[in-house]
Amino acid sequence: MQMLLVLPILIPLTTSVLMLLFWQRVDVQRWLSVASASGLLMAAIFLFGTVNTDGIQAVNIGNWSAPFGISLVADLLSAVMLVMIGLIGLAVSIYGLASINENHQHDGYHPLVQVLLMGLAGAVLTGDIFNLFVWFEVMLISSFVLLSLGGGPSQIEGAFKYMALNLFASSLFLAAIGVLYGVTGTLNMADLALRIGEGVVEPGLMTTLAVLFLIAFGIKSAVFPLFFWLPASYHTAPPVISALFAGLLTKVGVYVLIRFFTLIFIQDVAYTHTLLLWVAGITMVVGVLGAAAQNEIRRILSFHIVSQIGYMIMGLAIFTPLALAGTIFFIAHNIIVKTNLFLIGGVVQRLQGTEVLKKLGGLYRTWPGFAILFLISALALAGLPPFSGFWAKLLLVRAGLAAEGWIIVSVSLIVSILTLYSMTKIWNEAFWKEPADEADNPEMITPLTRRVAWSLLAPICFLAILTVGMGIVVEPILRVTDAAAAQLFDSSDYVEAVLGADAMSVVQK
């Protein structure tokens, strides 16, 4: 079992080292990247199956018992996130075979992606807050270099904004860690849940710490009013890198907020989760209005990342089992759909040389199948049936109505309509209308070789099939999300898995 928990970290780490040994052999790095992502996905699926069957799994590295050693923990939420990381890692690796130029590959694109995947896996598996900080720094360093690879002035500017604000968030995170350790004497998450539950920390101080962590991870999650770095940076990178970031980076920030505000900071729910609810609603509105004002595909999609984060925070803020289940469903759905939309945007840019909507057109006539792939992901993002987004939003709306959250439910439905408007704008401008120049000019379309077309379209087709499948075969997914929400709402199983039954018996006495 120890190896099963370590493998998702060990596979990309080993691959990145091997790639350094083959620094001059880009061809070897390319296929190592695909093999590593495949291995990561398989390890994540096996771990998910084990957690789903046998319950929460935990291991203490180096035989140092918790809370003194390094703990790796996998509950259903962690396992779902790992499967998503492996899935997106594989899709991006295949897409990158044809989309990343030689210069970027020689500058270290492939090993940097592996380091980023390692950081993502470590962040969702760690059971210790300081090690969480370490994994986030691994992610920050690798993502900054990826964001600035081969960059011109606009790309470097975007990378600088990304780095500066995330470094500020990391500094705030580290300061909050220091205070938390000073008042509790531990940073193990399960141990923190026990000690704080015993009342060893004054409630007002805990609420202050909760707000500090909320600000730190609010920046990393791109919630209002801390989101400005994201739409200023994500669209500047090559499309495959933007897709990887859009699918995973902010979602790991949301994962940490869920972990902290269901396990540790639950003493003053009336304040902290009401604050989260306001953040969720404003984040939805500001993000979707920003998207509606844009005229480039990836700029629109970048603002929609912000808007969709609001839905995830909404479920956490309502803080019922149904709401948490809706949040988990929404995260899984959004990771797939958002990644796919960015990959599709990259193909549009490849075909017509631009992402500016007024300069696009005619793609439905020349590439009808590709247009349908966009339509599937666009309608799923807006939450229309029978796609995955419909069920995710339905769970959140039901949870909001049950909690009498009339305002947040109304906001979420209005934002869905505005999201559909943005997606319709892309459809009309890029796919449906005639090309901007000569209507019958075949030179508007850049032909793709069979190999390039396979590499670009295969992951897009696969993610689109998953989007439809999650909407049609929804019952097994609901069972998993319900079980994951139950684990989050009652943390006793998590604490027992990490600290042992003896710790729980002490608490129960």
Image (cartoon, rainbow, N blue to C red):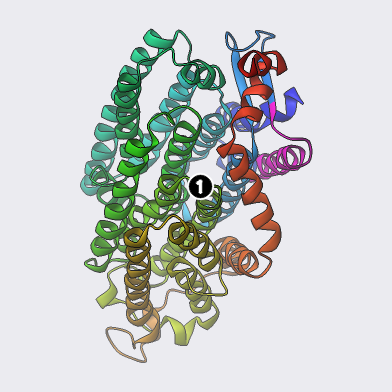
Residue in front for this viewpoint, 13 or 396: 396
Element assignment for label 1: loop
| Image quarter hosting the C terminus | top right
Q: Is residue 39 magenta?
A: yes
**Location of mark 1 (residue):** 320
Is residue 222 placed above or below 308 in the rendered structure?
above
Q: Is residue 70 left or right of residue 239?
A: right
The answer to which quarter of the image holds residue 505 is: top right
Q: Does the magenta stretch mainly form a helix, a strand or a loop?
A: helix
Q: Is residue 473 left or right of residue 169?
A: right
Q: Residues within 10 Å of mark 1 (few under 14, many from 20)?
A: some
Q: Position of residue 253 (x, y in %)?
A: 42, 38
Give the residue displayed 78% in from the left and 41% down from the top: 53
Whether residue 459 is visible: yes
Query: Magenta region: which residues?
Result: 33-57
Residue in front for this viewpoint, 500 or 286: 500
